[in-house]
Image (cartoon, rainbow, N blue to C red):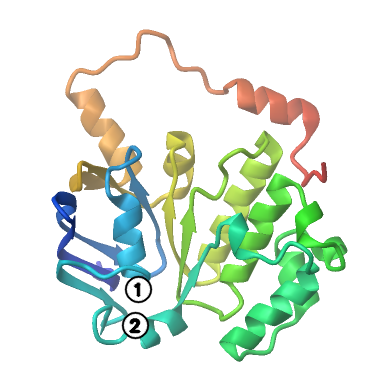
Amino acid sequence: MQTPKAIIEVKNLVKVYNELIAVQGISFEVYEGEIFGLLGPNGAGKTTTLEIIETLRTQTSGEVLVEGFSVRTHAGEIKKRIGVQLQAAGYYPNLTLAELLKLFAGLYNVRIDVNHMLQRVGLADRSKAKYKILSGGQKQRFSICTTLINKPKIVFLDEPTTGLDPQARRNLWELIREIRAQGTTVVITTHYMDEAEYLCDRVAIVEKGKIISLDTPEKLIDNLIESGFNKPKEVKRANLEDVFLSLTGKEWRDE
């Protein structure tokens, strides 16, 4: 069996803010073509870790390589290879989606087919709509769309489905899997464990600046069961969200 190729390598990463040690010697690899989840409670250090990989923050010590390039010495090369999901504050609210995409394309110095880009995320009919009038789900889809402008090798998605209705949430899951199927590695953070279980090939669980477990979701669940864990209530083959989607449909919704 061929050994997976590491596209991201994090080695003994440490980040200290004054007297606070936010990241305490984290080490892990992300393999090319996988969906990798970085999970943990608020304040665990996962966002700091991602920002260092994205070259948005400097490490105190340790080494981070993206496609063999060090974040310390080759940030420019790394930025050419990654797409980072912006939060809502990162967009000019009075520009249309087409105008925003053209603006970002200009910053990357690339040519894009605006309609094709919007079609990929179910927003082809909203190209002339101003960003500020979009629904929460539409804003999240557009945010993911902007990460794909420079055809990145890796995209970073920070809690992409927070606050979305079930249809938008499930459809974003399929969009993320489609992005991976087209050859892009995806690194995602989420507080929804069902989301991580459905999407991620492997997850790292971070607590107090350290990785306390790293494996496939299936293996982590099996290990818990083997330890003697038993849910007090029988798990059914469907849940209430499945009922909701079965009754209301799965198509994209425009609020």
Residue 223 visible in rendering: yes
Q: Is residue 220 left or right of residue 237?
A: left
Q: What crowding class fits label 1: few (fewer than 14 Cα within 10 Å), some (14-19), or many (20 or more)?
A: some
Q: Is residue 113 left or right of residue 153?
A: right
Q: Identify the residue at image location x=82%, y=46%.
A: 254
> Which quadrant is home to the C terminus?
top right
Task: Indicate the amino acid at tag 1.
Answer: Thr
Q: Quadrant of residue 239?
A: top right
Report, in whole angstroms, how far the alpha carbon at label 1 lies from the one at label 2.
6 Å
- Give the image location of residue 23, x and y in percent: 19, 53
Left or right placement of residue 170 versus residue 31 in this view: right
- The residue sitting at 63% across, 42% down in the picture is 170
Residue 31 visible? The answer is no
Quarter where residue 58 is shown: bottom left
Q: Quadrant of the N terminus?
A: bottom left
Say above or below: 132 vs 196.
Answer: below
Say above or below: 53 vs 141: below
Q: Quadrant of residue 196?
A: top left
Crowd tier of the residue under label 2, counting other residues whose Cα lies within 10 Å: few below 14, some 14–19, many 20 or above: some
Q: In the structure shown, which secondary structural element does the residue marked by tag 1 occupy? A: loop
Along the line of sight, which residue is nearer the eye, 16 or 42? 16
Query: In the depicted view, which residue is nearer to us: 173 or 160?
Result: 160
Name the residue beneath numbered marker 1.
55
Q: Are marks 1 and 2 in contact (CB under 8 Å)?
A: yes
Which residue shows up at 55% across the image and 57% down it? 177
Horizontal and vertical percent position of residue 53: 32, 68
What is the x, y in percent for residue 202?
A: 33, 51
Type of residue at label 2? Ala
Q: Which residue is mark 2?
A: 75
Point out residue 212 in the picture as x, y percentages from the top left corner.
18, 42
Q: Secondary structure at mark 2?
A: helix
- Horizontal side of residue 6 vs 201, given as left or right: left
